Amino acid sequence: MFTLAEENYLKAIYHLEKDSKVGVSTNAIAVKLNTQPSSVTDMVQKLANKKALSYQKYKGSLLTKEGKKIAANVIRKHRLWEVFLVEKLKFQWDEVHEIAEQLEHIKSEELIKRLDVFLDHPDFDPHGDPIPDENGIIKPTEKKLLSELQKDQRGICVGVKESSTQFLQYLDTRNIGIGTTIKVIDKEEFDDSMTIQVGETKLHITDKIANNLYINTH
Amino acid sequence: MFTLAEENYLKAIYHLEKDSKVGVSTNAIAVKLNTQPSSVTDMVQKLANKKALSYQKYKGSLLTKEGKKIAANVIRKHRLWEVFLVEKLKFQWDEVHEIAEQLEHIKSEELIKRLDVFLDHPDFDPHGDPIPDENGIIKPTEKKLLSELQKDQRGICVGVKESSTQFLQYLDTRNIGIGTTIKVIDKEEFDDSMTIQVGETKLHITDKIANNLYINTH
DNA sequence: TTATTAATTTAGATAAGCCTAAAAATAAAA
DNA sequence: TTTTATTTTTAGGCTTATCTAAATTAATAA
């Protein structure tokens, strides 16, 4: 069993490993977690004893398979709760992080299993980040322009290419934002326009729109 | 702000106060929380400093208005989460306590406000216990036989008078159990039978059934 | 009313998770 | 390559929430 503090360290290191193949530095962890480097040294030594990571003095830390699994599971819980908060409780996508930081530490496998079912097995959280599966596997995602999607393909909006006020307003009035799931209903070869599904409503959009929306897909 | 441990002490004392108008004994708290009396002494002294309770050496503890409010709020969160777990995630009513013990300490007023709305302002938890309102007020409840309810009145099933296997099976096949909300749709003067609503379905029951079900109402 | 028992408090320790300050090791610059 | 700067670790403390053991107070029984 891992404590709340330990889980937070594992999660931080998991995120930091992505940007570097070498050991994650003690300082980097301290910055990420807003603690002192000396506190980090203490903790990584403890986590090394618990076989959650490998640590060599002055060489940094790297998660073990076990450590990665635990971290991915915490991230899974975090992101599932974020989906719950936005989809069910109608929070804005930028209001949920702090609450999910707490909820991610609730201990019950069964709870998360059922939450996942309740939310209909979402693939992405409201920020467009992928949700690891029960084994901690994150399906590789591709960031594409909406225009590159095929018919019947779906993905989640993760950003815009052009960010003019006009364009953002266009999206706003149509309830498209970060985290919105978009499905391609139909594509028109002739003018590259497409019909998409956003929530319950269908929408016809021009190629200009489709060329300026970034979509995450599996 | 109160820590998780402090909240648990306040909750325990809140429950213990009910059964005694005098100060709650240190030992009673220790038993309830499964700790040593010496630990309790430490904690109640700390909580007395924080004005959450009044404490006199060897005389026990009594919650202040402030302490009661905090305790009631924790209980409110606990019971709302229990409703969520049973109604939305389809847990059994007897599986949810442990998880709710964790969820009750999540800190966010807004979260609970929205959860309450999402659950449609439930009055009782799945065990039939009343849910305090935002101010910590518990509306006084009455335990009646179902047969005593008026037309259009609703309540929650909290127990049975007769507990024969036959009767319990009758209830089971009709999805009536502890925590089930029951609404009286119609009463027939002639034979004292009634039509009730259980979930989505309407049901016609005889006076014998109505005379053996205990219902909590406001 | 005194002796005994039970409840409660105090004193001193421990583990987790953090801190500051000083020492040691590594990396960067001259 | 030596010096300087940066990073990391060690050492020693602090707080929270526990514990055990001993001391004290209150309650009960003789």
Image (tube, coloured by chain):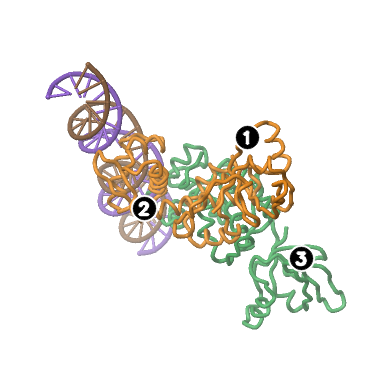
Chain colours: A green, B orange, C purple, D brown
Q: Is residue A72 visible?
A: yes
In this orientation, which residue lies closer to the viewer: B206 or A210? B206
Residue A218 versus residue B82 in the image, above or below: below
Chain at numbered mark 3: A
Q: Position of residue B115 (x, y in %)?
A: 56, 58
Helix, strand or loop at disc 3?
A: strand
What label sits on residue B67 in the rendered view? 2
Quadrant hosting residue A134: top right
Type of amino acid under label 2: Gly
Q: Where is residue B88 in the image (x, y as percent from the top left)?
A: 64, 52
Image quadrant occupied by the N terminus of chain B: bottom left
Of the two numbered discs 2 and 3 in the rendering, the one whose residue sits closer to the viewer: 2
Q: Can residue A115 be seen in this view?
A: no
Of the two numbered discs 3 and 1 in the rendering, the one whose residue sits closer to the viewer: 1
Q: Distance between the residues labelled 2 and 1?
A: 40 Å
Residue A157 versus residue A34 in the image, above or below: below
What residue is at 42 percent from the left and 57 percent from the top?
A34
Image quadrant occupied by the C terminus of chain B: bottom right
Of the two numbered discs 2 and 1 in the rendering, the one whose residue sits closer to the viewer: 1
Please tell me if label 2 and label 1 are on a single chain.
yes
What residue is at 52 percent from the left and 41 percent from the top?
A52
Q: Give the residue number, with chain letter if any, for mark 1.
A: B162
Type of amino acid under label 3: Lys
Tell me the crowding category of disc 1: few under 14, some 14 to 19, or many 20 or more residues within 10 angstroms, Cα based: few
Type of amino acid under label 1: Glu
